């Protein structure tokens, strides 16, 4: 990739950190494919898109899917909420709590608050086993975190999809391989 400079630095536990830079945009990491498990963190562009600041590619194929961000909808009748465009359906045994450990009910969650949901992403929604209401620091209020399996890769657009959300890669995105 002649237009891209890749700098690899060895980190803790043998992981590699790649800094992607290009005058015309960013190339997606070569190891990023449909089926790759990733964690992506970035700034909210809209309810369906983030601009990634960090991406971690995981060696493991299995794991817990997760989303952290602003709550955009709560539907008590449907036992669900939406966190940054990801529909989160509560399983029968879902634990709802505040970050201090206090137990909560779904009615205690409101649009505009922040939450982290964990579970399994299937059929276009996250089947959550745990949802935690969080209070972000002021500089984290536009941040979104996604963890899951890549379902679509668009190299020409420097984007990929995870949990149904488009993740945009830019020249400043840090990519870590684990």
Image (spheres, rainbow, N blue to C red):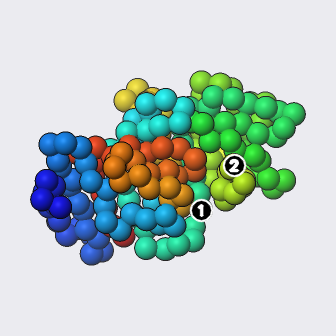
Q: Is residue 42 above or below residue 136?
A: below
Residue 167: horizontal and vertical position, in percent?
43, 45
Residue 98: in sight, yes or no?
A: no
Task: Give the mark nearest the N terminus, 2 or 1.
Answer: 1
Q: Quadrant of the C terminus?
A: bottom left
Of 36 and 143, nearer the camera is 36
What element does badge 2 sit on?
strand
Residue 43: horizontal and vertical position, in percent?
39, 35
Left or right of residue 116: residue 139: left
Residue 59: horizontal and vertical position, in percent?
43, 73
> On the image, numbered disc 2 is attached to which residue?
125
Of 23 and 13, nearer the camera is 23
Q: Quadrant of the N terminus?
A: bottom left
Left or right of residue 69: residue 93: right
> On the image, numbered disc 1 is attached to which residue?
64
Q: Nearer the viewer, mark 2 or mark 1?
A: 2
Label 2, residues with CA under 10 Å away: few <14, some 14-19, many ≥20: some
The residue sitting at 68% across, 50% down in the picture is: 124
Left or right of residue 146: residue 57: left
The residue sitting at 17% across, 49% down in the picture is: 21
Q: Is residue 106 above or below residue 22?
A: above
The residue sitting at 40% across, 26% down in the picture is: 138
Residue 107: horizontal and vertical position, in percent?
78, 30
Q: Is residue 26 above or below residue 80?
A: below
Residue 104: in sight, yes or no?
A: yes
Left or right of residue 125: residue 85: left
Residue 153 picture quarter:
bottom left
Label 1, residues with CA under 10 Å away: few <14, some 14-19, many ≥20: some
Cα distance in 3D space between marks 2 and 1: 13 Å
The residue sitting at 69% across, 57% down in the picture is: 122
């Amino acid at each position: 990739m002649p237009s891209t400079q890749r700098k690899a630095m060895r980190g803790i536990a043998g992981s590699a950190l790649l800094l992607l830079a290009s005058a015309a945009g960013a190339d997606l990491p070569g190891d990023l494919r449909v089926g790759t498990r990733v964690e992506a963190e970035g700034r909210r562009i809209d309810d369906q898109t983030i601009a990634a600041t960090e991406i971690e590619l995981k060696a493991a194929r299995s794991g817990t899917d997760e989303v952290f961000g602003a709550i955009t909808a709560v539907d008590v009748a449907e036992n669900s909420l939406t966190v940054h465009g990801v529909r989160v359906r509560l399983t029968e045994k879902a634990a709802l709590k505040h970050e201090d450990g206090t137990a909560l009910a779904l009615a205690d969650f409101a649009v505009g608050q922040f939450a982290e949901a964990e579970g399994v992403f299937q059929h276009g929604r996250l089947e959550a086993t745990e949802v935690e209401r969080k209070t972000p620091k002021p500089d984290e209020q536009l941040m979104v975190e996604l963890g899951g399996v890549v379902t679509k890769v668009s190299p020409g657009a420097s984007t990929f999809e995870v949990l149904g959300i488009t993740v945009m890669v830019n020249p400043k995105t840090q990519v870590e391989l684990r």
